[in-house]
Image (cartoon, rainbow, N blue to C red):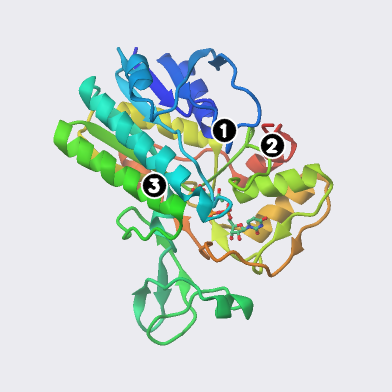
Amino acid sequence: MTRILVTGGAGFIGTHVVAALHDAGHHVSVVDCGHPGAHREPLKDTVAGAPLHRVDLRDRAALAGVLAGIDVVVHQAAMVGLGVDLGDLPEYVGCNDLGTAVLLAEMARARIPRLVLASSMVVYGEGTYECPRHGPVRPAPRTVADLTAGRFDPTCTSCDAALAPGLVDEDTPLDPRSVYAATKVAQEHLAAAWARQTGGAVVALRYHNVYGPGMPRDTPYSGVAAIFRSALEAGRAPRVFEDGGQRRDFVHVRDVASANLAAVAATGTRGGFRAYNIASGRAATIGDLAAGLALASGGPAPVVTGEFRLGDVRHVVAAPARAAAELGFRAQVGLADGVAEFARAALRG
Ligand code: UD1
């Protein structure tokens, strides 16, 4: 039996991770600060039977107390999403990077050698693209002029030709394009430095777009699945930005929990830092997701608005092969089944 501390264990993904680790027979405890960006209601005393300690990771002394006797830390705690505006910047860096720095320092002090880090596909920026004439292309951020004119797809940096989107693998250069993305890249780099200096093991899981039961209701920090689901629950049509053709990889939260279970095992067998896409490996458009949720919930059909957000990337779809080969992880929940369940599942208040 391994003693595991899950940070952010009271959140959407964390709750499923705690349940999966507990069901697998591990001894699990949770730290969570109940951050108002993620929690509207007070925290309970337990998560899936595991004791919850209300601790902000930046509180060094309190963190040291809950780390005593732990074998593995599964670090899910973070502020996610695009946020409201740049006023959020210090809080993103404080929670995600200072919080991680304090966690790593205290793990080193307590001689805890194993870490699973929740990272994100946002570290890649745009996905990978292929030009028929120039081969692989890394497009620049889209301009306001292009977006306003409805030119949503990035074009070749050499000849302006249309590009074919491809699958992003873990060796794709990191190219964070939002504050949140920058904090996730920094977490990975800090964890890699920690692994080098301590001889410890880090498995970083680059989650693609996670959805499923227990997602928080619509907030400035919510992903698109929660926003669409909240709109439908309120009897409103989902509002699809751009032309709805932007592609993502939607992965079910129970699959993400299984990936964490596999990652915990992997930290026991290999050292150093290693990152993995955690995804289904199957592309879906945002328009398809909206239509599928509307149909399954019997709500109003989506409206394609043509609006855009400058921080958004166009397409990101994962190559899932490394996690399959090295962690034995393959997503099990199909999108049609997952969406049908999610359309009716409870959201978190
Ligand atoms: C999302 C998360 C990010 C997470 C990543 C991987 C947010 C804001 N983003 O990034 O934190 O790391 O998945 O799991 O949580 N859209 C609409 N209508 C809306 C809202 C969004 O059409 O009402 C579109 C956006 O324009 C975008 C797509 O949906 O094209 C996805 O948006 P979103 O889920 O917010 O961001 P991701 O970049 O996919």
Q: Nearer the viewer, residue 219 or 306?
A: 219
Q: Nearer the viewer, residue 250 or 281?
A: 250
On the rendered image, what quadrant is the C terminus found in? top right
Image quadrant, ligand 1: bottom right
Q: Position of residue 278 (x, y in %)?
A: 43, 44
Residue 184: give its label.
3
Q: Quadrant of residue 290?
A: bottom right
* The residue carrying mark 2 has its beta carbon less than 8 Å from ligand 1: no
Q: Position of residue 312 (x, y in %)?
A: 53, 62
Q: Quadrant of residue 284?
A: bottom right
Q: Nearer the viewer, residue 218 or 281?
A: 218
Q: How far apart are labels 3 and 2 at the CA level?
A: 30 Å
User: Mark 2 sits on what residue?
Assistant: 341
Q: Is the residue 288 above or below the residue 251 in the image?
A: below
Element type at marker 3?
helix
Going by the numbered disc 2, the residue's amino acid type is: Glu
Of labels 3 and 2, the one closer to you: 3
- In the visual, does 120 lie left or right of 341? left
Element type at marker 1?
helix
| Mark 2 Cα shell of 10 Å, populated few (<14), some (14-19), many (≥20) | some
On the rendered image, what quadrant is the N terminus found in? top left
Counting labels gives 3
Is tag 3's residue or tag 2's residue first in the polypeptide sequence? 3
Q: Quadrant of residue 296?
A: top right
Report the residue at 33% width, 24% height from top: 60
Q: Is the residue 209 above or below the residue 201 in the image?
A: below
User: Mark 1 sits on what residue?
Assistant: 12
